[in-house]
Amino acid sequence: MATKRIRVRAYQVQFGDCFLVTVPDGKTTRHLLVDFGSAPGTSGTKESFRRIGENITQETGGHLDVLVMTHEHLDHMEGFYAERGILDKMTIDHIWMSLPSRPDYYTKYTKAKILKKIRADANRLTALLLRNRTALAPSFRALLRNNLSNLDRIDYLREMGKKNGHTRIHYLARGHSLGRKPFRSIKGRVLAPEKDVSIYYGGPHADALTRLAATLDAAAGGGATEAWSFPGVKRVEAPPNLSRTDWERLRETIQGGAVEAMRTIDKAQNNTSLVFQLEIGNKRLLFPGDAELESWEVMAKKSAKYLKPVDFLKVSHHGSHNGTPMDLLDTLLPKSRKQKATVIVSTKDKVYGTVNPVPDSGLLKELGKRCRRLITTQGLTKPWVDVEI
């Protein structure tokens, strides 16, 4: 019997996303699993992933209408791979992935190739650091691991369609309708990314990525002459013209620069996020993955007519200051509709350092003024929280 309710179950994965969306579609009930991951190094994920996988099977009867991977970060996809033993036993009709996950994407969209190169260099750098047993700040380590190419994880989902003749893979970009993938009465639309994701890192961002590519290449043993300082480089207590305090400050600045470099990669990958909207009856649900301000800016220009007040918002990028544009909140969450909107933030603090902390307290405060219920998984003691819309 079809359900008449819309339910979003947000699982406690600490710093990451995992949502089971159960919705009515005519005489049918649909189940969509939107992302399944947690940030690298997060404790207890093995046990929680197993509980989540078992619960998803129980709730869906082993049948997912749609599995969504919004983008290629471990905090959004690691659970799919970790619990592939459970997923392999399920029936999955459709898989939605962002267009850049298509195997031949960077052959067709050559301007975006630099992102692929940077991630490959990050892979080589990580292998070098592991071989040399280099000690890394936890925030830097998490950023580095989260942004690796992780081809085995991605290929697992890509191959699912070949293993199961009933599973269809859809690589999606702005403008794609989701009406027949697989819905009957539900309207779905993709708002981002653009087909050519280099649009998000053009101009000054392109220069930053080019410099970063050269730096990573050098650090990972490439042919460039300029490199970061890693094992094998002789270190000194402190230069004679600097006090020990000033020397430590300088080293902290250099280390901070490395983290900021990884944040540049993180930003580029976040802006490849699949952003989609579902209209179910008179309700509107928006799932923006980890889209950052650059992606929202393009959406505001090219998808403006589809950006309307929502009844449910999954907050982008775990509540970061650069994941939700304040100037769009009047459109998405007008205060006049406060009693109709529900907002969920899946997050955990102090994962990616203390500079521009995530979640951003100012953003959370503003969101709280614009919805009847603001839910954060931060500190959630139960394995999930349910929201009916």
Image: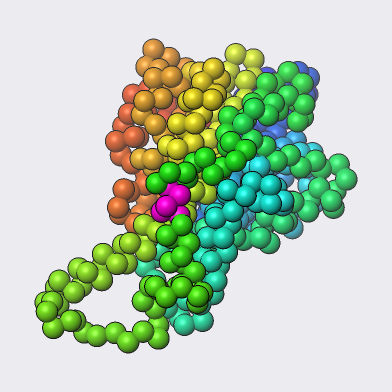
Q: Which residues are magenta?
A: 205-209
Q: Quadrant of residue 23?
A: top right
Quadrant placement of the N terminus: top right
The tally of labels here is 0
| Residue 22 coordinates in the image, percent (x, y) | 66, 31
The structure residue drawn at horizontal position 85% and vertical position 48%, both measured from the top left corner, is 164
The structure residue drawn at horizontal position 39% and vertical position 12%, both measured from the top left corner, is 336
Residue 283 drawn above or below residue 319: above
Residue 368 drawn above or below residue 11: above
- Compare residues 71 and 27 and report the one nearer the observer: 71
| Residue 183 coordinates in the image, percent (x, y) | 75, 25
Residue 104 drawn above or below residue 345: below
- 131 magenta-colored: no
- Compare residues 10 and 363 and report the one nearer the observer: 363
Q: Quadrant of residue 120?
A: bottom right
The structure residue drawn at horizontal position 40% and vertical position 24%, both measured from the top left corner, is 329
- Compare residues 237 and 366 and report the one nearer the observer: 237
